[in-house]
Image (spheres, helix red, strand yellow):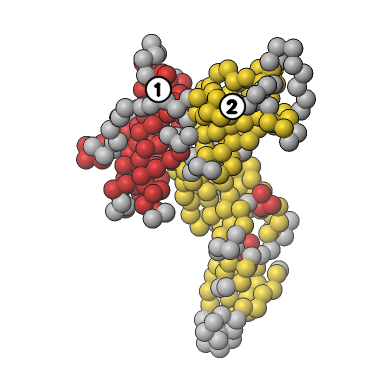
Amino acid sequence: LVAQTVVPANGHTYAGEAEVIDNVPTITYNCSVCGKSEHKIKLNFHGSTVYMDNTLAVYYYIDRDVDGIEDLGLKGFENISVNFSYGERKVHYDEEGNVVNDYSLTVSLDDAIKNNEDYYKFPCRYITPSQMGDEITAIISGSFNGTTYTFKMDNYSVKQYCLNRLAKSTSAEEKAMLVDMLYYCDASRAFTTYKADEELVTNALTSEQKALHTAERTYNSVLNKASTNIDNEKVTWEKAAIELYDCVRMRLSCKPVDGVSVGEVYAKATVNGEAVETYIKQENGVYYVYVLDLAYAQLSEEVYVTLYEGDTQISDTICYSVESYVKTKLNDTNENLVALVKAMMCYGDSAKAYFATKNA
């Protein structure tokens, strides 16, 4: 048993112990002043929310503060973690029930996000646009006095989050963004053929909500492989494209000038004058520069990328945007691809409008 003494702001004194009541680890507070008794059930989710900036994730909250005392909500527990499963990211079994592969995601307490709020945030990451309708099962587990306890929260999804917020929100900008997210999911499923035989997630919307879908517009390209140039560059830019996972990544390719030797290369990328993360890989003499951390609200923003060898600039600066890629695909013969990039831009436009209201 783990004894605790709690002194709340009202001056009452609670003495308590962590114990198991009805097979549930519980801490009971008994006030020595007024005799009041309180039961605090432990190892439980406080709630969840969707994170939708530069990636798509669902954050699950667990109390870290009880009666003003930090970490009391998990007192007495060890080896705390949350396991997430959704779509194909789950445990796969054979016909005999043996585990073949475990693709589920486990987040330990050490990897949880800790800040000045009253909760630990356990992120369920890597959710692709196609998986917004997938139900997520979240199981928190921890050992208490040598016994492992679990608590399960399921039947939640990005789709359900959108529907919940649509019922509660008074922001026209937020509602439009939530509707566009679900249309983006349907378009992504059609393109990837992921669960293409299932009901459209937008079928859950009312006709009034569907009317909030952002209108398509004219899309433009800002591609310029030499927005600023240098003499005697060592590498030249070739192709530009994007990749869609749980985020939007920009992929730029370049090759060394014939006969020129290139040492270790790194990239600098900026959006609106602010640096964004990049990484480079080399295959068959071609450098591939990936630009990360692009938020959906930044799909139309100009991205500037320059290559360096040590402190020396060795390439012209290329200017590109996700919208520039979309412009090149509007007349593609693959109708599902055209629908996907349009749906992505509608979501990007409404996300930009919504976050502008939050930052105003």
Q: Amino acid at mark 1?
A: Lys
Crowdedness near tag 2: few (<14), some (14–19) or many (≥20) residues, C-alpha within 10 Å: some
**Hey, which quadrant is residue 76 in on the image?**
bottom right
Q: Amino acid at mark 2?
A: Asn
Depth check, front residue: 56 or 38:
56
The residue positioned 66% from the left and 49% from the top of the image is 111
The tally of labels here is: 2
**Mark identifier at residue 229:** 2
Q: Give the residue pinned by disc 1.
A: 327
Q: Is label 2 in a helix, a strand or a loop?
A: loop
Q: CA distance from mark 1 to mark 2?
A: 24 Å
The residue positioned 75% from the left and 22% from the top of the image is 262
Residue 269: image location, x then y, percent? 59, 36
The residue positioned 39% from the left and 14% from the top of the image is 332
Q: Is residue 129 left or right of residue 186?
A: right
The residue positioned 45% from the left and 36% from the top of the image is 301
Residue 182 visible in rendering: no
Q: Is label 1 in a helix, a strand or a loop?
A: helix
Residue 71: image location, x then y, percent? 64, 65
**Mark identifier at residue 112:** none
Height in image: 295 above or below 200?
below
Residue 147: image location, x then y, percent? 70, 54
Height in image: 211 above or below 77?
above
Depth check, front residue: 69 or 22:
69
Height in image: 173 above or below 260?
below
Depth check, front residue: 280 or 106:
280
Quadrant in the picture for the N terminus: bottom right
